[in-house]
Amino acid sequence: MKKNKPKYHQIIDAAVVAIAENGYHQTQVSKIARQAGVADGTIYLYFKNKEDILISLFQEKMGTFVTRTAESIEAKQTAAEQLESLVQNHFTLLTEDPHLAVVTQLELRQSNKELRLKINEVLKDYLLLIDQILKTGIESGEFNQGLNVRLARQMIFGTLDEMVTTWVMNDQKYNLAASSQEVTNMLLRGFSSK
């Protein structure tokens, strides 16, 4: 399978850098190939076209993102600790890879409707993690029994997404991860049953 080959991941990583630095529309496949250190034709052994590279990039990176976040919240006992871990991970994983942050926050937003639908498919697993935390909190009595899970999920994801976008737009001049505790506390105040 192509996804298990080192060149596949080499091209994905190169695409993140090339797209972040040049923008999706200005990035030709040849730029990605150059960044990856492979011949242009090699790209087409792994991907149909540039759009396929972008979708694959998001699937790979978001898949890793979801797995790492799921592992981090698994070890936590309370829904509050799980939410704190999710927020911390969201900020940390994107600050560790500023190029990926630019691609996810800016470049993916400019894509066509078909591409956005494919991206939303990948996001579902992440949103389900958020739902799981909220349901755990409701069941344990930590969160308000009447909490609207759908709205709370949108509030959490929207807050994290906007925080990262603002950080990217400000040229990553401050420590985003340092605000994770304060963001978690504000969210928890909105959900708390106390």
Image: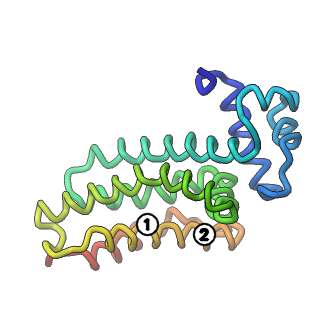
Q: What residue appears at the point 59 percent right and 47 percent down from the top-left corner?
A: 58
Image coordinates for residue 50, horizontal then vertical, percent: 76, 44
Q: CA distance from mark 1 to mark 2?
A: 12 Å
The foreground one among 166 and 3 is 3
Q: What residue appears at the point 51 percent right and 59 percent down from the top-left corner?
A: 91
Image coordinates for residue 169, horizontal then vertical, percent: 68, 72
Image coordinates for residue 39, horizontal then vertical, percent: 87, 28
Q: Image check: 127 left or right of 38?
A: left
The image shows residue 148, relative to residue 117, as above or below, that is: below
Q: Image check: 31 left or right of 50?
A: right
The three-letter code of the residue at mark 1 reads Phe
| Residue bearing mark 2 | 165
The three-letter code of the residue at mark 2 reads Thr
Local secondary structure at mark 2: helix
| Residue bearing mark 1 | 157
Local secondary structure at mark 1: helix
Quadrant holding the N terminus: top right
